Image (tube, grey):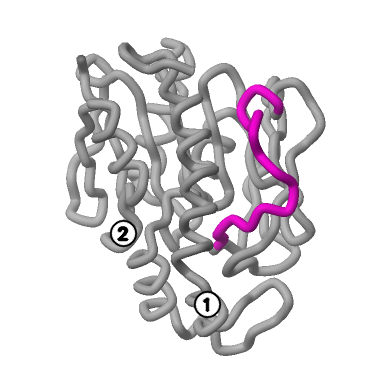
Amino acid sequence: MKPLLIFRHIACEGPGYLAEVLLQHGIPWQLIAIDRADPVPDTLDACSGLVFMGGPMSVNDDLPWIRQELELIRMARDRNLPVLGHCLGGQLISKALDGQITANPVREIGWQPVRKNRNAIADDWLAEFNDGTELFHWHGEIFSIPDGAEQILENDWCAHQAFAIDNILALQCHVEMTAPMVSEWARLYKDELADPSPAVQSATEINRNLEARITTLQAVAESLYRRWLQPLPGISA
């Protein structure tokens, strides 16, 4: 089986829990570390799908690798290959599909409850999701929902938390988190937590009850990842 290509844009925002799920299912993957200046492939011949992780940059920045990743997403769509994006990665997917990336009304950082949208696509991707489940967030921008896609998640601070189209899944929230990643981000990005608000939690709150929160988050992630992996050999619903 050809590997999935996972694009990492900054060292601390790797595949996290997704790597554990892929290992459990015997799905090979290859890391493309943009933060180490790894080249972006110009073809999809050597992969079975694409995954894009987060990062502090904007999709609207004029960076060569952003243009290259956008083109890969369009190529994957045309070949009906699975594509998955987390936060910045979800914004890349939206822009590649002619969506718009703009400032969210507020910065959203920390654990916030999310609701499932009421449509058949949301039911397909989130059959066991409970409204009010806390997911992890760290973003200041928001993607629009491209033509042909269906929104599947929302919350009070960010109107568009996720959308799906065919086997393309774009997430504004971070379901890939592990407990060490949460603590590391709270330390590395502590300046962004200096002025807590209803939408921005303090480092103390972000780390509170962390193991229980991560367990709940990863149950949601497991369900989403399993659904996204369905077209690959050896994966069942």
Q: Residues within 10 Å of mark 1 (few under 14, many from 20)?
A: few
Closest to the observer, 44 or 136: 136
- Dot 1: element: loop
Closest to the observer, 107 or 207: 207
Q: Residue furthest bottom?
A: 194
Closest to the observer, 20 or 186: 20
Residue 186 quadrant:
bottom left
Q: Is residue 51 left or right of residue 165?
A: left
Residue 121 quadrant:
top right
- Type of amino acid at the residue the image marks with label 2: Ile
Q: Residue at x 33, y 51 (%)?
A: 16
Is 172 above or below relative to 42?
A: below
Which residues are drawn in magenta?
123-137
Residue 105, how many percent across, how many down?
A: 75, 64
Residue 48, how many percent across, how many down?
A: 30, 19
Q: Residue at x 47, y 55 (%)?
A: 215
- Dot 2: element: loop
In the rendered image, residue 131 lying in the magenta stretch gets the answer yes
Residue 22, how many percent across, how many down?
A: 29, 33
- Type of amino acid at the residue the image marks with label 1: Arg
Q: Could you say which disc has been placed on residue 208 in the image?
A: 1
Q: Residues within 10 Å of mark 2 (few under 14, many from 20)?
A: some
Q: Could you say which disc has been placed on residue 10 in the image?
A: 2
In the rendered image, residue 94 lying in the magenta stretch gets the answer no
